[in-house]
Image: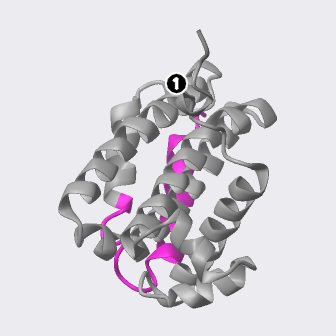
Amino acid sequence: MMQDSDSKPRKPRADSLRNRDLLLSAAKAAFAETGADAPLEDIARRAGVGIGTLYRHFPTREALVAAVYAREIEQLAASAEMLLAQRPAGEALEAWLNLLIDYMATKRVVAPALRADPGEGSKLYAASGATILPAFQRLTEAAHAAGEIRADIGFEDVLRMMSALGQGYEQPGWEPGARRLLSVMMAGLRAR
């Protein structure tokens, strides 16, 4: 009996994966500069591909926005273990929280576009918490275990502080103030 070779999904080609990554990077940069309404033709040009390639990967603007957002979530979560391998746990936590501020800034830019598709936007927001919170908790617990942050402050406390710090993230000029407050927060968290 012969097997139908078309029944197995093919792996994406290397050039297709590369083009997708280039498009996501170009879209992130364009969205940061001009918002989620950046012209798709400009994004394709930045990525060095044609508009047809963009549409093959992302049939709608909303699909592109959602993919940029999802990639930011994945990269943020993955960075936790990398930072723990490279730095002391307290420094890794602070570096990751700075990356979380970057993520919030990206979210600020794409949130209106995600809200335009309530079903997909809600799924992405739910997935972001399920992906990010375990990484955040892992970093906080590692800093505790290393004695680098105060023993009387738990993960829930650090989470509440970051939630408060994130208030107003949609306002212009939020990011520098958030980084300043994060520095103050970390100074207060350090074990003495």
Quadrant occupied by the N terminus: top right
Is 72 placed above or below 128 here?
below
Look at the image and tell me whether residue 180 can be seen. Answer: no
Task: Indicate yes or no whether the magenta region holds residue 51.
Answer: no
Is 146 placed above or below 48 here?
above
Viewer-side residue, 142 vs 122 = 122
Magenta-tinted stretch:
165-192
**Residue named by callout 1:** 141
Viewer-side residue, 50 vs 29 = 50
Q: Residue at x 50, y 74 (%)?
A: 175
Q: Residue at x 29, y 76 (%)?
A: 112
Tell me: 104 left or right of 93. left
Question: In the image, residue 161 lies at what x, y percent?
Answer: 36, 49
Amino acid at pointer 1: Glu
Q: Residue at x 27, y 56 (%)?
A: 120
Look at the image and tell me whether residue 68 can be seen. Answer: yes
Mark 1 closeness class: few <14, some 14–19, many ≥20 residues within 10 Å: some
The residue lying furthest to the front in this view is: 1
